[in-house]
Amino acid sequence: MKTYLISLMSADGPPPDDLDVSQVMGDLELVNADIRAAGGWVFAGGLADTASATTLRPGRGREAVLTDGPFVEVKEHLGGISVVKSNDYDQVIGWARRIHAATGLPIEVRPFMGDGDPGMPATE
């Protein structure tokens, strides 16, 4: 089975006042339950605020330079992920559509390298 990353892109700042977070979480759990039932569940989780991020950049030689915060300043950031498996890309897109419907957030679907790609190691 191919492995896919479903990324949820969040806007910077607090959620809108009119957002019912408990409803969003309930809707996401319904999607996750269906992914589990289909045998595609690997992992999912939300990420902490970007203020908690640490970025490592190349320094002198092989020494890494650590800085607080994300690598770049943007209006959107990675807010959460789901890792799923499926032999049916349309099924993965369907899950991503449901995640988008539950959250209203931009969603990116990307396959992991290696699953069926010649010359690349498999993720299993």
Image (tube, rainbow, N blue to C red):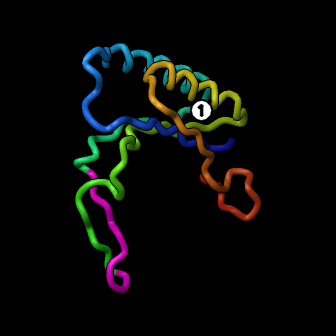
> Which quadrant of the view contains residue 14?
top left
Q: Is residue 38 above or below residue 116?
A: above
Where residue 22 sits: x, y (%)?
A: 31, 16
Q: Residues within 10 Å of mark 1 (few under 14, many from 20)?
A: many
Secondary-structure class at tag 1: loop
- Would residue 44 appear left or right of 6 to someone viewing this image? left
> Which residue is pictured at 70% across the width and 29% down the height?
90
> Which quadrant of the view contains residue 27?
top left
Q: In this orientation, which residue lies closer to the viewer: 121 or 91?
A: 91
Q: In this orientation, which residue lies closer to the viewer: 36 or 119?
A: 119
Q: Is residue 118 above or below residue 96?
A: below
Considering the image in quadrants, where does the N terminus appear?
top right
> Which residue is pictured at 63% across the width and 55% down the height?
113
Q: Residue furthest right?
A: 118
Q: How many marks?
A: 1
Task: Residue 57: say if magenta.
Answer: yes
Dot 1 corresponds to which residue? Answer: 40
Under mark 1, the amino acid is Gly
Q: Residue furthest bottom?
A: 61
- Would residue 70 appear left or right of 100 to someone viewing this image? left
Where residue 19 sits: x, y (%)?
A: 31, 17
Evaluate whether residue 6 shows in this view.
yes
Where residue 124 sits: x, y (%)?
A: 61, 51
Where residue 25 sits: x, y (%)?
A: 37, 20
> Which residue is pictured at 32% across the width and 54% down the height?
70
Q: Which residues are magenta?
A: 53-62
Q: In this orientation, which residue lies closer to the viewer: 99 or 112?
A: 99
- Would residue 57 appear left or right of 43 to someone viewing this image? left
Evaluate whether residue 43 shows in this view.
no
